[in-house]
Image: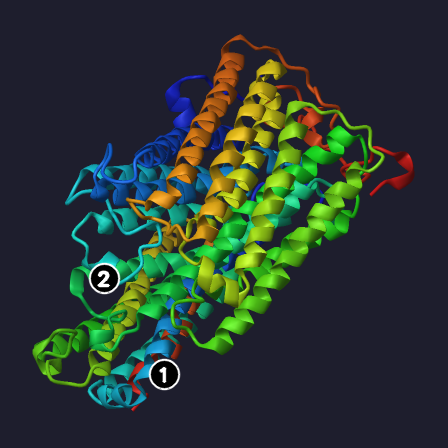
Amino acid sequence: MSYLDSPGGGLRSWLTSTDHKRVGVLYLILMLTLFWVGVGIGFTMRLKHLSAGNFLISAQTYNALFTVHGVIMIFMFVIPGLPAVFGNFFMPILIGSRDVAFPRINLLSWYFFAVGSVLAILSLFTGNGPPDTGWTFYVPFSIRTSTNVTLAVFAAFILGMSSILTGLNFITTIHRLRAPGMTWHRMPLFVWAIYSTAWIQILATPIIGITLVLVMIERFFNVGVFDPGKGGDPLLYQHLFWIYSHPAVYIMIVPAMGVVSEIIPTFARKSIFGYKAIAYSSLAIAAFGSLVWAHHMFTSGMSDTAGLVFSLLTFIVAVPSAIKVFNWTATLYKGSIEMAPPMLYALTFIFLFAIGGLTGVIQGALGLNVHLHDTYWIVGHFHYVMFGGTGFAFFAALLYWFPKMFGRMYNPKPMYVAWAHMFVGFNLLYFTFLVMGTMGMPRRYYAHLPQFHAAHLIATVGSWILVAGLMILFGNFVAALFKGDQAEDNPWGGLTLEWKLSSPPPAENFAEIPTITAGPYSYNPTRTG
Amino acid sequence: MSEVPEKDYQGAKIGMWLFLFTELMLFGGLFILYAGSRALHPEEFHTASRELNVFLGVANTVILLTSSLFMAAAITAIQKGSKKLAMRLVALTIACGVFFLINKGVEWSQKFHHGFYPNGPALAHSPAGEPIFFGLYFIMTGLHGLHVLAGTLLLCVMLVWLARDRVRADDYVSLENSGLYWHLVDVIWIFLLPLFYLAA
């Protein structure tokens, strides 16, 4: 009996299930819904820029749209996306366990996520209109604006609780529930990535929690801890906000790197190059990534010494990311590469993430940052990391594991067509952003000057091609769900534990807990890990 | 890592410790805020701190420290199988928690009565840092108070579980975890006392 049928297939049995696989699928459904809401909003913002002035939507609506686009995409898709969906579904299987350590808490965190999402959506339609502060909720505006910031902030707080509980659960699971013989250095790299991410989730998220509570307290009681008129300091808000929100970037990207580390050896038919380097660079990213937050504040009036320190640390954090990229490339060398859809998307991740990462190093330089801060360059940079990086890795993970999760195989051809659209559209859209940013186009502006008009048109056309690609991709997934052929148990020839189970996996995962005797990617017998 | 027993004690305790880390970080954000604000207004914090009642603050410290002793003793008692003693000790811990909250309530209402709160009459003409001091005082002791309340309620549940033998000599990890939580709440107070009451 697969987990899809046992116990029962009714809605009720799903909503009360503590099976980690079902919880993962619940997350997937909710998140993809929210993702499409975010895509719709982004698409609308691009449409607005078909004209330099008043067009389609009002300036106030535009402010609300970029705020809500950010809140939904960041808090409800890219941050929880890979850990909550694929971490939940595959991490226990990859370590040879029947479930996570605290299955009921796992389901509870999905409910927190659902409630947070519903509240966030509610904040759009209730009170004095949707929040218009930007996703960063910077003071003093977030305290003074009459729009519905309080509810939105509360929603983000609840989403944070969901993230904390998931992280706590994963760390305990990886420490306690590994199968016999599954030593730390035999764990698949996706598990290492999830482990590193979970530490950031539990250590950083409480800081955003308390910061958001402070915004609510200020809105209700006007204490003034961030109000210079009363002796408070608005910079303290920015520090507190970024102490979480920069590490959150690594919550987004580290699991994506984990996915790529699974896909590349499978489709290169080679043991991964530099297993330990990749594993420990995840931890290094988690550690250094927690010490770079103030590079978001170089132009805020912070001290120059602080600026220098944070700039240096920012350069350092690029090192472990580069370690991964070089190791993936080395894995491909002399491999027997099969360009199946998951591989194509994983390689695209490397390309787009490299652009995102390198642009990040550029803006980490103090002098250049003054010029680039708050321009479309920044918007381009983080879309390369979050969409080009995490987004494409999410699609790659879905392409890789979809047959295992649902027991159906998709038609690969439309996936290539979708890729071509997305790749062209994506670069047309966001590379133009980078160029526009260096020319001085400020982010979050409703109107633009005539000299930027041509670039805005190109970017908007890019967004159409990108969305067309997304539609082909997901259309094909939906078609496969209903009409796809029965998937094989191991369609890609993978060696990790999930491929030893039936597709879809049985409810209890393993009839008998396996004993592990070798590393996860032992493709060439001379180089077992 | 061989056969994992039906109930994983070690796992439950790891989970609890991780949760305590998140609590520390939650308060950590506020400690950063306190440090930043105090660096900006050292003298105002000094002056404002004089308005707090050191006697009540220290009394509450003694109450919480004593309660932690009762808590630790309760765990030892159940380990050794004396259910009645464990229940008495948990009840004493709960009583200490309630005393603490009453004490805190008295203190807060005094401050409100005299107008020592942000935007309150007593602080209307004081220099800019003092309302921040009282703002942080209410926010941080308030959040801590909520934790004491949560801990007290948790211990009430433990009392019921003890009575029903859900917590017993061979299965007491939930009591132990509640104890960990209670000690954390205690430790945080130990930091709040000097930062607010003894800053003058």
> A12 and B126: which one is in front?
B126
> Residue at 42% of width from left, 68% of height from top?
B28
Q: List x then y, in percent, for residue A61.
A: 23, 40
Callout 2 crowding tier (Cα within 10 Å): few <14, some 14–19, many ≥20: some
Q: List x then y, in percent, for residue A518.
A: 81, 39
> Residue at 60% of width from left, 34% of height from top?
A90
Q: Which residue is mark 2?
A: A217
Which chain letter matches label 1? Answer: B
- Figure colour scheme: rainbow
What amino acid is labelled 2 in the image? Answer: Ile
> Residue at 73% of width from left, 28% of height from top?
A494
Q: Which mark, residue A480?
A: none
Which chain letter matches label 2? Answer: A
Using the rendered view, name the quadrant where residue B179 is placed: bottom left
Q: List x then y, in percent, for residue A133.
A: 28, 52
Residues at circles 2 and 1 in contact by the CB criterion of under 8 Å: no
Using the rendered view, name the quadrant where residue B26 is placed: bottom left
Q: Which residue is mark 1?
A: B39
What amino acid is labelled 1 in the image? Answer: Ala
